[in-house]
Amino acid sequence: MEHIMTTVLFGVIAFLVLLVVFFATGKETPPRPIDQLPAPSIGVRRLAGEKKIIDAIKLYRRETGASLREAKLVVDSIRTSAAAA
C-alpha cells in the first residue's frame, strides 16, 4: 500500500512540474512599440536596403539586444519606408 501511495505522489508531482514548465515557457512578452525601439544603425539600414533581411535582423539584435520579433518589425519598417520613397 505504501508503494502505491509513493507512486501516486510521484506521479502527481511530476504532472504538476510538467504543467508549470509548459505554462512558464509558453508565454512570450509582446514586442515593444516600434517607436520605443532603438534606431537602426547605418549597417542595419544598408543590409535591409540590399535585401539581406536575415543579416539585417541579426545585426540589429546583436547591436540592440532586441527580440527576434522586435528586430523583424524594425527591419520590415525600413523596407516599407524605402519602398514608399
Image: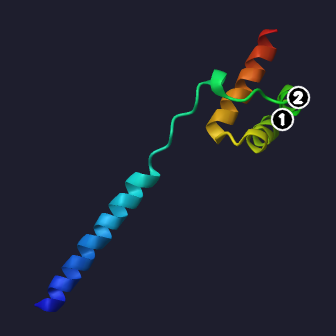
Q: How far across and down, in percent of the image, does residue 54 sit?
A: 77, 40
**Residue sticking out furthest to the top:** 85
Q: How far across and down, in percent of the image, does residue 24 sit?
A: 42, 53
Residue at image coords 14%, 90%: 2
Q: In the visual, does 57 lie left or right of 70?
A: right
Q: For mark 2, does the 10 Å Cα neighbourhood hold few (<14), some (14 to 19), or many (20 or more) residues?
A: few
User: Considering only order in the chain, which callout, 1 or 2, is on the residue closer to the N terminus?
Assistant: 2
Separation of marks 2 and 1 at Cα, in angstroms: 14 Å
Q: How far across and down, in percent of the image, does residue 27 sit?
A: 45, 45
Residue 51's place in the image compared with 10, above or below, is: above
Q: How far across and down, in percent of the image, does residue 63 sit?
A: 79, 41
Residue 68's place in the image compared with 11, above or below, is: above
Mark 2 residue element: helix
Residue assigned mark 1: 52
The mark lying in front, picked from 2 and 1, is 2
Residue at image coords 26%, 78%: 10
> Residue 42: which numbered mark, if any?
2
Quadrant location, the N terminus? bottom left
Quadrant of the image occupied by residue 83: top right
Q: In the visual, does 53 lie left or right of 4?
A: right
Residue 3's place in the image compared with 49, above or below, is: below
Mark 1 residue element: loop
Q: For mark 1, does the 10 Å Cα neighbourhood hold few (<14), some (14 to 19), or many (20 or more) residues?
A: some
- Residue type indicated by callout 2: Ile
Residue at image coords 29%, 67%: 15
Q: In the visual, does 57 lie left or right of 15?
A: right
Quadrant location, the C terminus? top right
Color theme of the render: rainbow
- Residue type indicated by callout 1: Lys
